[in-house]
Each structure stands twice: as structure tokens, then as C-alpha cells.
Amino acid sequence: MPATPMAFLSEPEPPRFTPLTTAPGVTRIVAPNPGPMTYHGTNTWLIEGEDGLTVIDPGPDHPEHITSIATAGPVARIVLTHTHPDHMAGAPALRGATGAPIYAWGRPWAPDFRPDVAIADGESVGPLTALHTPGHASDHLCFALAGTKILFSGDHVMSWNTSVVAPPDGDMGAYMAGLRRLLARDDELYLCGHGAPLPNPLPLVRGMLSHRAGREASILAALRDGPLDVESLVAQLYAGLAPHLFRAACGTVLAHLLKLQSDGRVASEGSRWGSHS
Ligand SMILES: [Zn+2]
């Protein structure tokens, strides 16, 4: 199967500490935590409502960033797509500054964190309806905005790059199922955890699925001649990989192997993996 290309978006570095209008009643403030995993920084989304602002992902605990959210308007609620620190570390400070409760999936990845209100799949929170989309993180939620075709897609689908899916918390089978779940919807704009707004998102979602299916096929092909360990698979599959990315690639390949194992297509033999086909 030829892989559908992934058309990622780039954008110039956005201004900080100021809400940028994205859609009617929806603004974003880009947190000052740029990096190789976060692009220009975490997108904090602000949605206007009659009872105040719904804030999605306060981002890192950066005082000037948190102040810029707290002073954008009265905050009714704080909602987390997942509890990785680049999304949630600033949530307690924002709650302290505003008194707004924190909503998140009930079994958070972050060990010492408990949301004030646990959200289940399909539940509504203010103007949002939650979709549980584990894969990047076991506690990951996307949020559909009522009355629109906007989906806040968190780190499940990002406009600028593929998501990291690595064990133990990352789950490739769940991640791919989550992409298929989004393909069954008719959202027209994704507002992501990092990167520019993504209009017409479904072709990119299809491209991400076929990228992962292609990686799966190349792992199975590499195992045809006999069992291999993860490191040898990475060396074969990622020719010319920069050394500092080697561990991350091992995590991705292990995530694929665990998914293929639960599909009954590979089995582990000590530290090596063998194909059934
Ligand atoms: Zn993130």
C-alpha cells in the first residue's frame, strides 16, 4: 500500500502572552515552552461562554503565561486533554488564581494529580463533549465544540508532526483505533495541542494511519528472515537516524511490536521478536 503523504503545517513563531483569535469565540495563547517535542510551545485554548471562559490546557507552570490566561476574562473551568506536564503543570496555578475547577480523565497519567471533576467518554463539560482517545497518553481526551465542526485534538492529532506513541503509557493499537474514530466524524477544523489550526483535517488523519500501517508492514517484512531485537529493527528500519533519536525510535518500534503481538502477528522470544507469518 503506498503511504499517503502527510501534509504538515508550519507557522512563524507566534507572539506570547496574548490571546490570538482563531475562530468566533475561540482564542489561543501559545506558551513559552518551544522545543523539539513542543514546536513553538503548547497551545492554551480559551473558549468564550456565558458563564466565562473554558480554558483547555493551561500549559507549563510559567507565571507570565498563567497570568495572561487568568486576565483574559473570568475563567469558569479548566479542562485538560491529558496530564503530560507541558499541558497540565500550570493547571494548579491557574486554579489558584481563578478558583476554577480542573476537569480531566479520571485515571490521570500524572501520578500525584487528581482532577476536581473526572470526565468520561461522551460527557459534556461546558461547551465541550469529550472523546477518550488514548494512544499518545492513556488519559488523552479530544473535545468537540458544541454547535461547530471544531475538534480540540490535543496531542492525538497535531498539525506540525506525528505524535509520540511509546510504552509503557503509549499504546499503538489504541492510538490507531483513535485515528479511525476521528475518521468517522465530520470535523472541519482541528485545534491542536501544538502547532497551527488544521483545516480539512481528515486527509492528514488518513495519512497518519497509513504512515503507521506502513511502519507495521516494514517491521513484519524485517522479521521475515528471523527474529530480531528492538535495537536491530530500529537500525534496519531507520537508516541514517540521528543518534539522539535512537531511544525514541526504539519506543515507537516497541509500541508497534506490542500492537502486532496483541493482533497475534508477532511473539517475543526473550529480547527478540519473531513473526508468525
Ligand atoms: Zn504536548
Image (cartoon, helix red, strand yellow):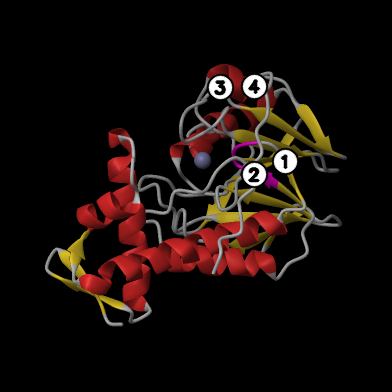
Q: Earlier in the sequence, mark 1 or mark 4?
A: 4
In this figure, which residue is indicated by the disc labeled 2?
Answer: 192
Q: Earlier in the sequence, mark 1 or mark 2?
A: 2
Mark 3 sits on what residue? 32
* Circle 2: residue type: Cys
Image quarter where the N terminus lies is bottom right
Residue 194 in picture, x, y percent from top left:
59, 38
Q: Secondary structure at mark 4?
A: loop
Give the percent coordinates (x, y) of residue 63: 54, 19
| Residue type indicated by callout 3 | Pro
What residue sits 63% from the left and 36% below the top?
195
Instruction: Let me know if residue 85 is in the magenta part.
Output: no
- Between circles 3 and 4, the one closer to the viewer is 4
Residue at the image point whose x is 65% and y is 54% from the top: 204
SS for tag 3? Answer: loop
Badge 4 crowding class, 10 Å Cα cut-off, few under 14, some 14 to 19, many 20 or more, is few
The Cα atoms of the two marked residues, 1 and 4, are separated by: 14 Å
Kindly identify which numbered label has been placed on residue 197: 1
Is residue 122 visible to the viewer in this orientation of the structure? no
Evaluate whether residue 58 shows in this view. Answer: yes
Camera-side residue: 45 or 211?
A: 211
Range of the magenta residues? 191-195
Question: Comparing marks 2 and 4, which lies closer to the viewer?
Answer: 4
Q: Quick check: is the Cβ at mark 2 less than 8 Å away from ligand 1?
A: no
Name the disc covering residue 13, or none.
4
Left or right of 201? Residue 250 is left
Distance between mark 1 and mark 3 Cα atoms = 18 Å
